[in-house]
Image (cartoon, coloured by chain):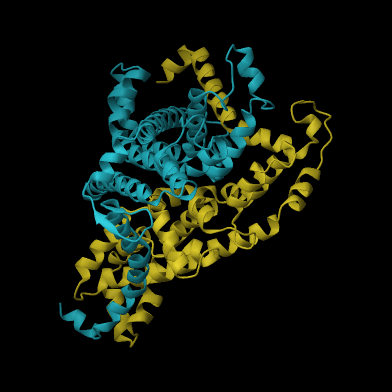
C-alpha cells in the first residue's frame, strides 16, 4: 500500500473520473430516472399535474393488443435471428475450416457484409426483393411463391430475419471459426482413429467445446436483434405490413416520435431497459466465468 | 482420416462445392448492387457480358442529394466520438485501475450499470435533455451520449491492470508525474487495445442510425446512414440504379477498410466486439 502514498493528490483521481461521470449522469442516469418516474405517473391532459398510479401504466400497456403484438413479433424476430444467425455461421465455419484453396478470399466474401450498416442492408434487400422490380421476385414467383412482402406479414418477417442474419453473419462466423481452430487436432484425430465419423466427431467433440462461444453469441445476437436492427426495419418494412414487423424498439420510436405518446413510451422504455439489463447480467456472468476459467 | 477422404472423393467435392455455393450466395447482394450501380438501368436485370460500363449512376446520386456534406458529417461525428471516448475512457480507466479513492467502488458500479443501459432505450428522454441544452440538430448532440463508453472504460481498466507496477514505479523514480506516467507507460502498452477499440467504435458509429435519425433534421448535421434513408425513401422517380450506387458509395469507406485491414478488424471484434 505504501506505493500509493507517492500518488499523493486525492483530487487527481476524482478529476480523472469526473468528465466521464458527468456525461454518464446527464445522458444515462438522468434519462433512465426520468423514464422510471414517468412510468409510474400519469399526467393530466394538459401536462400540469402528475399523479402516482403505481403499475397501472404497465398493466395498461400489457393489455394493449398492439403492444402485445409487438412483444410477440420481437420474440419471434429475435429468436429467428438467433437460431438462423447461429446455425448458418457455424455450418459455414466448419466448411471454411476445410476449404483449403482460396481461404483468404473465401473468408472475405463472408465477412464483407458486416461492413454494411443495418439501415443500408435494409435498402439493399428491399431492392433485391422489391415486389415490382426486385431481381429475385421473378425467381420466387417461378417457385410458386406469391411474393409480395409489402402486403404479406409473414414474408416481411422472413425477409427482415434474412437481411438481419446476412448482415450479422460475419460476427458470428469469426467467433465460430476462431473457436473451431482452437479445438485440438489431436483430439479429433484420436476420435477418427477410434472410428467416429465426421458427424459424430462434430457432436461429441467440437460442439461441446464450442458451446461457450455459442452461448456468448446467443446473447450478442439477441441484443442485436432487439436494437441494432432498427435501421433495417425502418428502411425495409417500417414495422409493417399491419405491424407484422413492429419490434419493440421500432414501436418505442414510432409511439414517441410519430404518435407523440410520451407517457406510454416511458413505460415501454422501462420494459426494454429491464430486458437489456437481464441480458447484460447473463452475459456478464458468463464473461466473468470465462475470465476465471 | 486420409483414407476416409480418398474413399469418398465425391463427398469431398460436394462439400467444397457446397461451401463455395454458400459463400457466393452470401456475397450476391453486394455483387448485384455493384452490377446495378455500374451499368445503365436498362441492364439492371439483364446480365450480358457486353453491357456498357458507366459511372453515371454514381454521378447522379452524388448530385441528387448532398452526399458530400453527409460524408463530412459522418467523418466529423466518428472522429469526435472516438477522440472523446479515447480521452475520457483512458482517464477514467487509469483512475479505476491504479488509484484508491473515496467512492471508487460506487463509481465503478455506476460504470457497470451503464453497460446495461443502451442509449437506444432512452431516446425520448435524451431528446428532451438535448433540447433543454439547445443542442438538437448539432453533431455534438449525436455523439454526446456515446462519449463516456462504459465498455471502453472496462476494457482499458482490464488492460491497465496488467501493466507491471515496476514500470510505473521506475517512471516515477525518474520524476514523472501521474499523467506523464499514464502517457509514457500505460498508453503505449495498451496500443493494441486502443486500435481494437477504435476500429469497433468507428465502424459502429459510421453505421449507427436510430439516435442520429431522431436528433438531426437538417442537411448540415445528418450522417450518411440517415441521408441515405431519406434519399432512398423519397419517391422522386429516382431509379434504383442510382439508389444502389448511393448505397455502395456510403458503405465504400468501410467496405474498403474491411478489405484492407480484414485481419485487424477480425482481431478487434474478438477483443472488443461486445461494443
Q: Residue at x 58, y 43 (%)?
A: A120
- Compare residues A137 and B133 and report the one nearer the observer: B133
Q: Is residue A119 left or right of residue B161?
A: right
As drawn, the residue found furthest toward the left would be A1
Which residue is painted at 56% across and 34% down in the image? A106
- Could you say which quadrant of the image residue B114 lies in? bottom left
Q: Tell me the shade of chain B.
A: yellow
| Residue at the image position 57 percent from the left and 15 percent from the top | A145
Q: In this view of the protein, which residue sits in the foreground, B146 or A146?
A: A146
Question: Would you place residue B237 above or below residue A195 in this image?
Answer: below
Query: Which quarter of the image is occupied by the N terminus of chain B?
Result: top left
Residue nearest the observer in this picture, A170 or B163: A170
Q: Residue furthest bottom?
A: B175
x, y percentage for residue B217?
58, 58
Q: Is residue B192 visible?
A: no
Chain A colour is cyan
Amino acid at each position: 500500500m505504501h506505493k500509493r502514498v507517492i500518488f499523493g493528490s486525492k483530487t487527481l483521481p476524482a478529476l480523472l473520473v469526473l468528465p466521464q461521470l458527468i456525461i454518464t449522469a446527464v445522458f444515462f442516469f438522468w434519462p433512465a430516472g426520468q423514464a422510471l418516474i414517468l412510468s409510474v405517473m400519469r399526467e393530466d391532459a394538459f401536462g400540469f399535474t402528475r399523479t402516482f398510479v403505481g403499475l397501472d401504466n404497465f398493466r395498461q400497456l400489457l393489455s394493449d393488443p398492439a403492444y402485445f403484438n409487438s412483444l410477440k413479433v420481437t420474440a419471434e424476430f429475435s429468436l429467428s435471428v438467433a437460431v438462423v444467425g447461429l446455425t448458418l455461421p457455424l455450418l459455414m465455419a466448419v466448411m471454411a475450416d476445410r476449404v483449403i484453396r482460396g481461404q483468404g478470399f473465401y473468408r472475405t466474401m463472408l465477412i464483407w457484409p458486416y461492413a454494411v450498416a443495418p439501415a443500408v442492408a435494409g435498402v439493399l434487400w428491399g431492392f433485391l426483393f422489391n415486389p415490382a422490380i426486385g431481381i429475385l421476385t421473378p425467381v420466387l414467383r417461378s417457385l410458386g411463391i406469391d411474393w409480395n412482402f409489402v402486403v404479406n406479414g409473414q414474408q416481411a418477417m422472413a425477409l427482415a430475419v434474412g437481411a438481419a442474419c446476412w448482415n450479422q453473419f460475419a460476427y458470428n462466423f469469426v467467433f465460430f471459426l476462431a473457436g473451431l481452430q482452437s479445438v485440438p487436432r489431436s483430439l479429433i484425430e484420436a476420435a477418427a482413429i477410434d472410428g467416429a465419423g465426421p458427424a459424430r466427431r462434430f457432436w461429441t467433440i467440437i460442439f461441446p467445446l464450442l458451446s461457450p462461444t455459442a452461448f456468448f453469441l446467443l446473447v450478442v445476437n439477441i441484443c442485436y436483434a432487439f436494437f441494432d436492427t432498427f435501421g433495417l426495419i425502418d428502411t425495409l418494412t417500417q414495422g409493417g405490413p399491419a405491424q407484422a414487423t413492429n419490434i419493440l424498439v421500432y414501436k418505442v420510436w414510432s409511439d414517441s416520435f410519430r404518435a407523440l405518446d410520451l407517457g406510454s413510451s416511458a413505460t415501454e422504455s422501462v420494459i426494454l431497459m429491464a430486458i437489456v439489463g437481464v441480458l447484460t447480467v447473463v452475459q456478464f456472468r458468463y464473461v466473468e466465468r470465462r475470465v476465471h476459467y | 482420416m486420409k483414407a476416409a477422404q480418398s474413399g469418398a472423393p465425391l463427398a469431398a467435392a460436394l462439400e467444397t462445392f457446397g461451401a463455395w455455393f454458400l459463400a457466393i450466395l452470401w456475397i450476391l447482394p453486394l455483387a448485384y448492387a455493384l452490377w446495378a450501380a455500374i451499368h445503365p438501368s436498362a441492364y439492371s436485370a439483364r446480365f450480358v457480358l457486353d453491357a456498357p460500363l458507366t459511372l453515371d449512376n454514381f454521378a447522379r446520386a452524388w448530385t441528387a442529394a448532398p452526399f458530400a456534406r453527409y460524408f463530412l458529417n459522418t467523418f466529423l461525428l466518428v472522429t469526435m466520438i472516438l477522440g472523446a471516448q479515447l480521452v475520457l475512457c483512458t482517464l477514467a480507466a487509469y483512475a479505476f485501475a491504479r488509484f484508491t479513492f473515496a467512492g471508487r467502488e460506487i463509481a465503478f458500479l455506476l460504470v457497470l450499470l451503464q453497460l446495461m443501459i443502451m442509449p437506444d432505450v432512452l431516446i425520448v428522454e435524451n431528446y428532451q435533455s438535448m433540447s433543454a441544452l439547445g443542442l438538437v440538430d448539432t453533431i455534438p448532440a449525436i455523439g454526446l451520449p456515446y462519449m463516456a463508453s462504459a465498455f471502453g472504460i472496462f476494457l482499458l481498466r482490464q488492460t491497465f491492470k496488467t501493466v507491471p507496477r515496476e514500470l510505473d514505479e521506475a517512471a516515477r523514480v525518474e520524476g514523472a508525474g501521474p499523467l506523464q506516467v499514464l502517457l509514457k507507460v500505460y498508453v503505449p502498452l495498451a496500443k493494441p487495445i486502443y486500435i481494437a477499440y477504435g476500429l469497433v467504435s468507428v465502424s459502429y458509429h459510421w453505421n449507427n442510425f436510430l439516435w442520429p435519425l431522431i436528433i438531426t433534421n437538417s442537411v448540415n448535421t445528418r450522417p450518411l446512414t440517415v441521408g441515405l434513408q431519406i434519399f432512398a425513401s423519397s419517391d422522386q422517380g429516382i431509379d434504383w440504379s442510382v439508389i444502389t450506387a448511393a448505397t455502395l458509395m456510403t458503405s465504400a469507406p468501410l467496405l474498403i477498410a474491411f478489405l484492407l485491414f480484414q485481419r485487424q478488424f477480425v482481431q478487434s471484434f474478438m477483443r472488443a466486439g461486445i461494443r
